[in-house]
Image (spheres, rainbow, N blue to C red):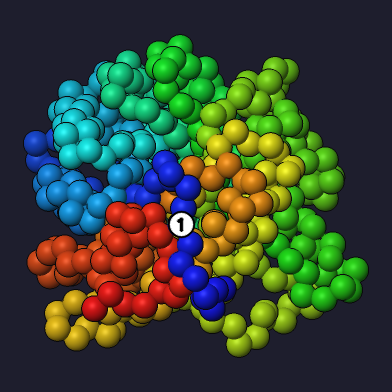
């Protein structure tokens, strides 16, 4: 798509910003006592994080948040999606509010508003209080109730100042990587546990929506889901069947009950799931209306039943994820046609790249510019097709703790120098700034320097 010849303009009101999450950037402060999260526990277990690192310091955002807000303002970004660390505001997951933790987020929100940046908090980006995990975490239905109470507390304290709340980030990843493959915290490997966790995450989302509607009636409410389009490698029935199951499990499992009030039947059957954790009325709670869907998109998957590695020779990022922007366009039109959403925001899109071209002290990341350019072009094509796209948030504002990969995978448009934690905008940040300031996507994504 990089060869589209003329610059194109995004519609008026379309916003550009960046995204981060609490555990990936904040670190800890002595001034903010907090509870442990499941990611603290996970990082402390040998072998869980590829480079043996943890989130105790991360980008030290807990001390540098003012500078980070200034940075976003200097880049012309109008929206910031961040997440609230549940164990910073309610250390044990339920019970007493931790005032220093609450004050931290109140200050960030006020700082953003003063800088003219719209705050878009996500209530849960994977850092579950360990105290709740000790009682079963998301496999325990009580965690859904605890989440709704926490949502209520946040809406009561920040409600007036927040135009858009997101409940969960990528429940697929919490459920499946956390409980089925064990790559993420809490690191269990059990399909039944994963399906129970997925259901309780969705239930928690629905219960939280009800609380937020009451406590913040003016706010727009939504959830952030990740989608990885699944395509068969060939027309062979076995490939097609495999792609169908992956599509159901990876892409439909969350949006379908939210929009249709039921789990996708064919996938339920394929998994042989008995739904014993689903109680009467749960699906009505889960299907509460939302105002906005956050879409996280990074890559697609091409599936072969005979296990070939696919597709061969296509460009990939440092995560080994195929770069395939046309799949984003198709995904957005599918979501719109299938689920008729009121509004869609790209809440994450971006790429880990090698970042080894460092002439004159700055990372020249032409590859990341190309990635962003082509995916933004796909968003424009979706807009042309009538998909109600409202904004685009780059993942991520800055290099950060990339979960089980540690700090080795860098997604930032701003570099965080490992030794000093200094922030230095990469070429992609300056390129993105021009787009954010003008709303014009240039014909191709060249380095502004
Ligand atoms: C998403 C996560 C985000 C980040 C990106 C690369 O799945 O939501 O925190 O790790 O992937």
Q: In which quarter of the image is residue 96?
A: top left
285 over 24 or under it: above or below: above
Residue 277 on image: x %, y %: 68, 29
Q: Quadrant of residue 51?
A: bottom left
Is 92 in front, or is 375?
Answer: 375
- Residue at 30% across, 19% down: 160
Q: Is residue 260 visible?
A: yes
- Residue at 28% across, 50% down: 77
Q: Which quadrant: the N terminus?
A: bottom right
Is 137 in front, or is 372?
Answer: 372
Spot the residue most to the top. Answer: 214
Residue 32 on image: x %, y %: 14, 35
Say what secondary structure mark 1 lies in: strand
The residue under label 1 is 9
Spot the residue most to the front. Answer: 6
Q: Dot 1, crowdedness within 10 Å: few (<14), some or many (≥20)?
A: some
4 over 143 or under it: above or below: below
Q: Can residue 48 be seen in this view?
A: no
Q: Quadrant of residue 147?
A: top left
Residue 376 on image: x %, y %: 48, 61
Q: Which quadrant: the C terminus?
A: bottom left
**Left or right of 230, for residue 184:** left
């Amino acid at each position: 798509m990089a060869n589209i010849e003329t610059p194109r303009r995004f519609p008026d009101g379309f916003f550009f910003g960046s995204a981060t999450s609490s555990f990936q950037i904040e670190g800890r402060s002595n001034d903010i006592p907090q509870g442990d999260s499941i990611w603290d526990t996970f990082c402390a277990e040998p072998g869980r994080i590829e480079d043996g690192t943890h989130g105790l310091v991360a980008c030290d955002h807990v001390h540098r948040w003012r500078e980070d807000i200034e940075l976003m303002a200097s880049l012309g970004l109008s929206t910031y999606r961040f997440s609230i660390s549940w164990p910073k505001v309610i250390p044990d997951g339920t019970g007493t509010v931790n005032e220093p933790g609450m004050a931290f987020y109140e200050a960030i929100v006020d700082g953003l508003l003063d800088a003219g940046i719209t705050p878009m908090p996500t209530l849960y980006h994977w850092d579950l209080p360990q105290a709740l995990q000790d009682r079963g975490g998301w496999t325990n239905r009580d965690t859904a109730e605890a989440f709704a109470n926490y949502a209520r507390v946040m809406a009561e304290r920040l409600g007036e100042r927040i135009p858009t709340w997101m409940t969960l980030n990528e429940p697929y990843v919490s459920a499946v990587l956390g409980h089925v493959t064990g790559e993420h915290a809490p690191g269990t490997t059990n399909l039944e546990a994963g399906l129970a966790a997925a259901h309780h995450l969705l239930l928690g989302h629905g219960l939280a929506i009800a609380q937020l509607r009451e406590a913040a009636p003016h706010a727009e409410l939504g959830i952030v889901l990740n989608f990885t389009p699944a395509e068969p490698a060939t027309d062979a029935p076995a490939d097609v069947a495999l792609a169908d199951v992956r599509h159901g499990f990876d892409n439909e499992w969350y949006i379908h009950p939210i929009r249709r009030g039921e789990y996708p039947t064919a996938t339920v059957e394929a998994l042989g799931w008995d739904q014993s954790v689903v109680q009467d009325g749960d699906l009505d709670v889960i299907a509460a209306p939302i105002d906005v869907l956050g879409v996280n998109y990074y890559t697609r998957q091409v599936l072969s039943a005979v296990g070939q590695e696919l597709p061969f020779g296509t460009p990939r990022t440092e995560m080994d994820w195929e770069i395939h922007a046309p799949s984003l366009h198709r995904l957005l039109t599918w979501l719109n046609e299938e689920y008729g959403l009121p509004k869609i925001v790209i809440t994450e899109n971006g790429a880990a790249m090698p970042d080894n071209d460092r002439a004159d002290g700055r990372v020249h990341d032409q590859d990341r510019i190309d990635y962003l350019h082509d995916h933004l072009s796909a968003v424009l094509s979706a807009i042309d097709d009538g998909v109600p796209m409202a904004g685009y948030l780059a993942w991520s504002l800055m290099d950060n703790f990339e979960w089980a990969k540690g700090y080795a995978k860098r997604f930032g448009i701003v570099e965080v120098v490992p030794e000093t934690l200094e922030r230095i905008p990469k070429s992609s940040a300056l390129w993105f700034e021009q787009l954010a300031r003008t709303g014009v996507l240039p014909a191709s994504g060249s380095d502004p320097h």
